[in-house]
Image (spheres, helix red, strand yellow):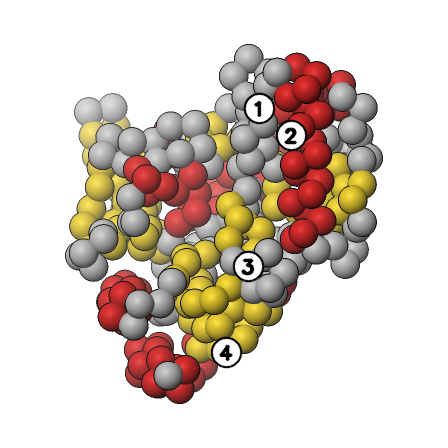
């Protein structure tokens, strides 16, 4: 059975883009995760469609990842197919368009392009309002799915539309409004859609000012975030009326540790892998933090991290 599935996937993506029992610790920024039965890296939209169809035909679970920057995979791995939309699908195309307020720039990018790379590309062309994305360690696909944001900016501010695969294996285009973008959410989290491509609209700005802003935000991140340790970024969503990091700090949990996983001493909103940590340790620590904050402040901290696989 496994050989038949392997051969089916092989016909779609080729040997260079298919692995068996691939350690997911190599593909998550947490550096945690057991093996995925099948790990595939498609190069085209059509291959993504074919992979999804194949998984459904074989009744195989599958999961889409980008850079693995907001993901915790169980220590026992993932029983099914991990489809990584990454560097193989990272196209970039810019077009100047004229509107009522002058020229703007329409940029179409593959879902696998890194946000940080896109931020630098548009900055070099003098396009503004994407500086906020310069330090977010994810791909365009993940960013659209989560409506990623930082420092007062978010994807929905500059996104025109996204091309997706729907639940029937059809490629369709959804407008900004149809994507139902909200705080760290979109329709893609509610329906089995897969982002393939996104189209943005930027205004012209001052190149020097744009690059200075990126440098300023980079400095702030280095000073305030534990970038020297593996993590999945901000662990908890911001609860209404509060800041997750402050609640955790006020509960005396700064530096709290379970095995090799700990609440960052630099920023309590981050859970970090101090070296050799496990998914089980992450889960225990997250539950401990949630319980303490709820007991102290009657606030439930909802995780921002996605959790998949066998724990």
Q: Decide which of 2, 174 is in the foreground and name it.
A: 2
Q: Which residue is mark 4?
A: 20
Relative vertical location of residue 21 with respect to residue 260 in this rendering, above or below: below
Disc number lying in front (3 or 4): 3
Could you tell which of marks 4 and 2 lies nearer the N-terminus?
4
Q: Secondary structure at mark 1?
A: loop
Q: Position of residue 107 (x, y in %)?
A: 32, 45
Q: Which residue is mark 3?
A: 310
Q: Which residue is mark 2?
A: 290
Residue ID at (39%, 49%): 141
Disc number lying in front (4 or 2): 2
Q: Position of residue 70 (x, y in %)?
A: 54, 46
Could you tell which of marks 3 and 4 lies nearer the N-terminus?
4
Q: CA distance from mark 3 to mark 2?
A: 21 Å
Which disc is residue 300 wearing? 1
**Label 1: how many residues lie within 10 Å, few (<14), some (14-19) or many (20+)?**
some
Could you tell which of marks 3 and 2 lies nearer the N-terminus?
2
Which disc is residue 151 wearing? none
User: Is the residue under label 2 in contact with that under label 3 (CB below 8 Å)?
Assistant: no
Q: Secondary structure at mark 4?
A: strand
User: Is the residue under label 4 in contact with that under label 3 (CB below 8 Å)?
Assistant: no
Relative vertical location of residue 147 with respect to residue 82 in this rendering, above or below: above
Residue 212 image-quadrant placement: top right
**Label 3: how many residues lie within 10 Å, few (<14), some (14-19) or many (20+)?**
some
User: Is the residue under label 1 in contact with that under label 2 (CB below 8 Å)?
Assistant: yes
């Amino acid at each position: 059975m496994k050989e038949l599935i392997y051969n089916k996937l092989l016909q779609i993506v080729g040997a260079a883009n298919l692995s068996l029992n691939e350690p997911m610790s190599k593909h998550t920024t947490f550096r945690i995760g057991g093996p995925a039965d099948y790990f595939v890296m498609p190069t085209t939209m059509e291959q993504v469609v074919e992979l999804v169809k194949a998984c459904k035909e074989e009744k195989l679970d599958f999961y889409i990842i980008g850079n693995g920057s907001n993901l915790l995979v169980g220590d026992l791995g993932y029983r099914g197919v991990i489809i990584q939309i990454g560097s193989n699908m990272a196209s970039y195309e810019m077009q100047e368009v004229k509107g009522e307020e002058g020229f703007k720039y329409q940029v179409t990018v593959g879902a696998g392009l890194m946000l940080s790379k896109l931020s630098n590309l548009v900055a070099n062309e003098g396009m503004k309002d994407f500086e906020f994305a310069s330090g977010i360690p994810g791909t365009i696909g993940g960013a659209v799915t989560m409506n990623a944001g930082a420092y007062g900016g978010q994807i929905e501010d500059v996104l025109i539309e996204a091309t997706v695969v729907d639940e029937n294996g059809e490629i369709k285009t959804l407008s900004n409004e149809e994507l139902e973008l909200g705080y760290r959410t979109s329709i893609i989290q509610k329906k089995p859609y897969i982002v393939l491509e996104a189209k943005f609209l930027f205004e012209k700005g001052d190149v020097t000012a744009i690059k200075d802003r990126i440098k300023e935000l980079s400095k702030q991140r280095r000073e305030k975030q534990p970038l020297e340790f593996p993590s999945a970024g901000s662990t908890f969503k911001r609860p209404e009326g509060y800041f997750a990091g402050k609640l955790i700090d006020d509960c005396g949990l700064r530096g709290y540790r379970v095995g090799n996983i700990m609440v960052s001493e630099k920023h309590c909103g981050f859970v970090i892998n101090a070296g050799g940590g496990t998914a089980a340790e992450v889960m225990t620590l997250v539950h401990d933090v949630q319980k303490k904050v709820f007991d102290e402040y009657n606030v439930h901290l909802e995780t921002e991290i996605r959790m998949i696989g066998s724990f």
